[in-house]
Amino acid sequence: MCGIFAYTGKKKNSAKLVIEGLKRLEYRGYDSWGIAYKSGKDIHIHKEVGKIGEFKIEGSKFDPSNIAIGETQDTQVAIGHSRWATHGGVNEKNAHPHFTEDKDIVLVHNGILENYKELKTYLQKRGHKFISKTDTEVIAHLIEEHAQNHNFEEAARLAMQEMEGRYAIVVINKQNNQIVAARKGSPLIIGVGEKEFYIASDIPAFLPYTNKVIYLDDYQIANINEGKIKFYDTQKREEVEKRIIEIDWDEESAEKGEFPHFMIKEIMEQKDSLSRAINQDPSIIEKVAKEIRSAGSIYLTGCGTAGKVAMVAQYLFGEVSKLQSHFYFGSEFLSQAGFLNKKSIVIAISQSGETADTMEALEMAKEKGAKIVSIVNVENSSMARISDFVIPIKAGPEKAVASTKATSSQLAILTLLAYAMDGGIIIGKQLLINTTSQINDMVNPRYEDHIMKIAKKIKDIESMYIIGRGKNYPIALESAIKLQEVSYIHAEGFAGGELKHGPIALISQGTPVIALVSNDQHKKDILSNSIEIKSRGGFIIGIAPENDEAFDFWIRVPDTGETSPIVNIIPVQILAYQLAVLRKNNPDMPRNLAKSVTVK
Ligand code: M6R
């Protein structure tokens, strides 16, 4: 949800460097972009509507290398932003960076300033003029207001005290070469080089230059000046020391390689990503399993796809571990506040570890004294850092907006956890090793070609449905998300048994319906549901270990028992990808969506 990238150091042409970094963050926001860079005392700003990924300096009217930044000053300073619009339409005026009238203060922002209206009214009365419709511009003027009586860093600090909501900001000013960065609720990470610093919403932006990182925490401000960095905690009102962490993601895993899109690359990587998830040190899983077992009440939370994974866990905990748990989406968690106490345990599932709604649920649970477990891909994310226990899923960087490999790895960890709670982590691991080895039969071109036959047949349809039962019911819901977000086809998932209570009225001649079938206690019933649909003209695409007379088209999946959610979602991921490509959509950057949803 908006990408921030900034640089200060001795590398020549920081503007070009920031543009390249923003391209690596495009998955966070891609409706418009902009950069600001210092040249002498001046701050130059350039903004454009459209995808930063499609911008080429060669042939463009805007070429930052024409402005001899390197010759006019030694220390380079540049900030940049790719936008996912919240306040104000998509146009150059509303694109970041935002600035005060004579560009004294220039900043980029990720998040939402909740009290911007009140602050704007106050600032307008004080004579400030606004040119955009954004909440962000208000922050620039607020800092300027305080800068009348305070130095730049202090002005930013005072502004932060008045700002409500979740945000990450990076600010520069005309007077000197300082960069001030601050966060509350939205991610901001500092890459540390040799007397140089990178500031970004996510690590891949600066991974080609350094793997040494500092995570800025909520209410903290970083002040970078002439090769030195200092941190200040606005709550403790004191300077703080921060730890440099070396991370081990290599740059290559964040690149597309031979694949046309990240989405298909990430789908095809699932054998390896699953192996990494299940072959990690089991002690943390056993420890968490013990904590969950002894908790007074168990809650699961997450949003979107991660929410559907949490729903699968509810079934796994019930069936495998014989434990009752409660699932609520992060955005719906607030109404459970009254039930949370010191004996509760809340398990959050998230790829990014930054999703605002899930974070808010965890913050609330923490306040109530509940224990927090997070199952995340980004190991040092905000969720990981407020949790009592963290289980990393080890999927590696997931860049496509549609979650695929993170989903299967989350499912694998929750399966292990369910078995560990039943005292059988070894049985769970063996089951997952077997599943992983059988995934080879699915992540290959022959399997893709088979699914392409059905993708071509249904590519122009308006609506489709997915049915499942038991733990494949949440997978039907997840299948719908996958199809919606990249193919833009209207897709809905239902519990098989619920069809005859209403949704079956939607079926007409040729309506495609995917039936998720596995060899479990629900097999007979889901096949009957498929026959009911077929007899009303529906076209049944069966995802199942064996073919059946109910199916008009069969996609074979291996028979892996309890891990059927993992194998059943993979063909749907492939189908969604193929439909996106056939319908000429960009599967990596679907319209209106961003990878990391750091606003409520
Ligand atoms: O980073 P998270 O897993 O917390 O993200 C939660 C959802 O925003 C995410 O799963 C979203 O639904 C995906 N785009 C689905 O593919």
Image (cartoon, grey):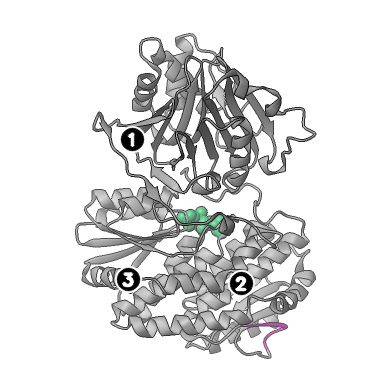
Q: Estimate the x, y position of residue 284 in percent, counting from the top left.
A: 30, 68
The dot on residue 285 is 3
- Tell me the kind of residue under disc 2: Ile
Disc 1 crowd, CA 10 A, few/some/many (<14, 14-19, 20+) = some
The quarter holding residue 80 reads: top right
Q: Secondary structure at mark 3?
A: helix
Q: Separation of disc 3 and disc 2 at Cα?
A: 32 Å
Of badges 3 and 2, nearer the viewer stands 3
Q: Estimate the x, y position of residue 193 in percent, counting from the top left.
A: 46, 40
Q: Which residues are magenta?
A: 550-556
Q: Secondary structure at mark 2?
A: strand
- Tell me the kind of residue under disc 3: Ile
Q: In the visual, does 473 lie left or right of 26?
A: left
The quarter holding residue 234 reads: top left
- The answer to if 345 sits in the magenta stretch is no
Q: Residue at x 43, y 49 (%)?
A: 354
Can you identify the residue that label 1 sits on?
219
In this orientation, which residue lies closer to the viewer: 283 or 312?
Answer: 283
In this orientation, which residue lies closer to the viewer: 211 or 473?
Answer: 211
Q: Residue at x 43, y 46 (%)?
A: 212
Label 3 C-beta lies within 8 Å of the nearest ligand 1 atom = no
Can you identify the residue that label 2 sits on?
466
Q: Separation of disc 1 and disc 3 at Cα?
A: 32 Å
